[in-house]
Amino acid sequence: MNESKISVRYAKALFLLGKEKNVLGTIVTDMKLVGELCSTVKDFWLMVESPVIKTSQKRKTVKMILADKVDAISLNFLDMVFENRREIFVKDMVRNFLDLCRKDAGIVFAKLTTAGETDKEDKTKLSEMLKKAFDSKIELEEVLDKDIIGGFILRVDDQELDASVSNQLSQIKRTLVQ
């Protein structure tokens, strides 16, 4: 089975369960926590990926870490994922689940990459401009990346505006080489 099919099916199942039980907001919060845990705690992700660690030990560890932090539905979902040995797809499941929730709520996800901190006023203005342009609510995530030197990269759905200094330098270099 294709990796994306696995993660989409599990995400869709969790989404439908959350809607049915009317706890979608709680599960969204839980899945954001799980996604952050997978992305930021390297030891946790190494444990999840490890083929050497037994499934039963992984399940116990996940329950121990998340038992008092997430809802029972989210914990049972994760337990089922680990029991079915699909744990390496957890990051994709979380991403797909959050995408489904955004689509259901009519929210467009935007990612702003900058070299330094953006002040709150500029983020608010950008959100308002995007809200008008896409005629929908906007969820704006800011990412810091020193490699872009300056400027910004804005990604909304499958569209990208690259106004970074590093991109402009690359364009100048290509022009000079030609």
Image (cartoon, grey):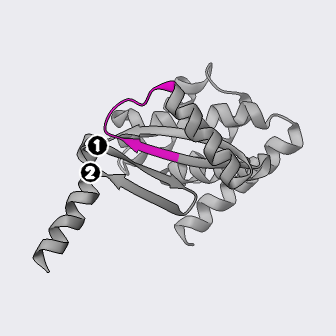
Counting from the top left corner in percent of width and height, residue 22 is at 87, 36
- Report if residue 113 lies within the magenta region: yes
Q: Amino acid at mark 1?
A: Gly
Q: Is residue 150 visible?
A: yes
Q: Residue furthest bottom?
A: 178
Q: Which residues are magenta?
A: 111-120
Q: CA distance from mark 2 to mark 1?
A: 5 Å
Front residue of 133/158: it is: 133
Q: Quadrant of residue 75?
A: top right
Q: Position of residue 93 (x, y in %)?
A: 59, 52
Q: Which residue position is annotated with label 2?
A: 165
Residue at the spot 24% in from the left edge and 46% down from the top edge: 147
Q: Which residue is mark 1?
A: 150
Of callouts 2 and 1, the N-terminal one:
1
Residue found at x 65% / y 26%: 70
Quadrant of the image occupied by residue 116: top left
Say which quadrant the N terminus sits in. bottom right
Assess whether mark 1 and mark 2 are in contact (beta carbons under 8 angstroms). yes
Residue depicted at x 76% and y 49%: 106
Give the image quarter of residue 39.
Answer: top left
For the residue pair 5 and 152, the one nearer the viewer reads as 152
Which quadrant is the C terminus positioned in?
Answer: bottom left
Query: In the picture shown, does residue 4 fall above or below 135?
Result: below
Hey, what amino acid is under mark 2? Val
Numbered circle sitting on residue 161:
none
